[in-house]
Image: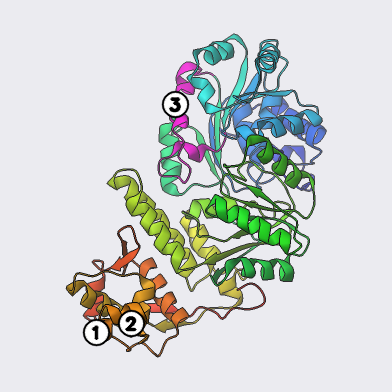
Amino acid sequence: MLPSQPPAPAPSDALEFGLEPPGSADASAQLAALETLRRVWGYEGFRGQQAQIIDTVIGGGDALVLMPTGGGKSLCYQVPSLVREGTGVVISPLIALMADQVDALSALGVRAGFLNSTQGPQQRRDTERAYLAGDLDLLYLAPERLRSAETVRLLDSGRIALFAIDEAHCVSQWGHDFRPDYLQLSMLAQRWPAVPRIALTATATQATHAEISERLGLDEARHFVADFDRPNITYRIVPKDNPRRQLLAFLRAEHPGDSGIVYCLSRSSVEATAEFLVSEGIASLPYHAGLDREARARNQARFLREDGLVMVATIAFGMGIDKPDVRFVAHLDLPKSVEGYYQETGRAGRDGLPSTAWMTYGLADVVQLRKMIETGEGDEAHRRRQGQHLDAILALCETVSCRREQLLAYFGQPGTGPCGNCDTCLDPPQAWDGTIPAQKLLSTVVRLDRRGQRYGAGHLIDILRGVATPRVSQLGHTDLTTFGIGTDLTQGQWRGVVRQLLAAGLLAVEGDYGTLGLTEGSAAVLRGERTVPLRHDPAPTGRGG
């Protein structure tokens, strides 16, 4: 879909571009770009770095663009495609959205087409003929099409204005959405060295940025890194306690009748949450990969065109979606990475108006994701990368400082200062010395380990709180010296201790059943050589927390 770009104040044409380094467009092409923007999209001027990026590509230079969701990345290749001779070829993983993207461009008078596996033979032939005749401004291709010698011959037979590699983070094994088909895209420069390339992504750490540059051969390209701050989004993360009811309270209190997206980890949770919201009078639709293609397309189209709908989805939904008035993005489960969280929450508030990124987060999330990493596919290096991603999102959840400041620092923008528009700024959490509770919990793990036994969080908490359940009694765990030494904390508080120790790497999830064990850092805590500061979880409120 087209970018949501509120009209900017009209700058003077001379100031809009200015002189650029080698590889930039001449003055006439620069003015043609601005005229195209005004004529086709109706905007008076470019925003941020758009003008410099477009100038570079029109002039035949390569560009690597890191720009947050809603920053107007699409214009950075759409405008040059209309100004340069030939057809702009866009490599995109968004097969489900290509038809919508082409329809939206066609409605603006842009000649656009796509080639992917959803087309019939006649549709494909019509698109190919239009390309060969020079009748397309933009041609969208799925990355796997470039494995076909037939597609390469087709491109050779026409005139290519540029190559745009959208969602370029897919090329990175470090990134949150690795796509092997993207690895072959380095062949673009080898096969068509005179054609400028522009790679774009909304989420990239410094490591991902470097890997994209290396894998696509863009080290000599101009690199544009935009400000990743989305100041209109309020970030809130709340302890998980009946998450669907929490979500309902949040929607009724803050976003009644608003459009929004709710992300869940599993398909079954998507279905159950959508049904729950509908039963509570909130118009909702499900979206996940288990639905047939027609149902997904139908629900997606309704969400894009209707007001006040809530889409409940797995992460299969959202990439490339441009609905400017999404007022909230909610997560009922912990995302696997900060990159994923940032991209998903960035779908809120693309019109610049106040919006909310809201998430419930609990102990079960940490245990489940730790277990998925340990038992999942891939080598040790892959598991280590996944663990680092999880550590980063846990640190964001558990921080007592500004969430936005930590989020921006993750993407290479340190030192921004408190934002005043996240939960930790608006209602600062209190920290407390959790060293003694941590020692009590870890001592219980040690004593069970000496018996050759491992248990999950619930059983450990029962022992600490002196709850003689039939299982605790039957196993003889009332005889442990730690039985009943933790009655000063509630069950919920103890679960917070366990969650934060897991987040800090002072407890480990082991085995298929999510049992808990010690880590290398546990010994220092037990010896009193390391203190354990913990955050007080706020009490649940009517605001969904």
Left or right: 188 in relation to 101: left
Which of disc 2 and disc 3 is earlier in sequence? Answer: 3
Q: Amino acid at mark 3?
A: Gln
- Figure quadrant of the N terminus: top right
Secondary structure of the residue carrying numbered label 3 = helix
Magenta region, residue range: 166-194
Residue to which mark 1 is pinned: 480
Residue 514 falls in which quadrant of the image?
bottom left
Front residue of this view, candidates 481 and 338: 481
Q: Residues within 10 Å of mark 1 (few under 14, many from 20)?
A: few
Q: Is residue 64 within the magenta segment?
A: no
Hey, which quadrant is residue 475 in on the image?
bottom left
- The answer to whether residue 168 is magenta is yes
Q: Residues within 10 Å of mark 2 (few under 14, many from 20)?
A: many
Mark closest to the chain's N terminus, 1 or 3: 3
Give the percent coordinates (x, y) of residue 238. Answer: 56, 71
* Nearer-N-terminus badge (1/2): 2
Viewer can see residue 211: yes
Residue 41 lies in what quarter of the image?
top right
Colouring method of the image: rainbow
Figure check: 11 above or below 402: above
Q: Amino acid at mark 2?
A: Ile
Tell me if label 1 and label 3 are in contact, CB under 8 Å: no
Separation of marks 3 and 2 at Cα, in angstroms: 55 Å
Residue where numbered disc 2 is placed: 463
Residue occupied by mark 3: 184
Give left or right: position of 145 versus 512: right
The image shows residue 391 at horizontal and vertical percentages of 40, 60
Q: Secondary structure at mark 1?
A: loop
Q: Are marks 1 and 2 in contact (CB under 8 Å)?
A: yes
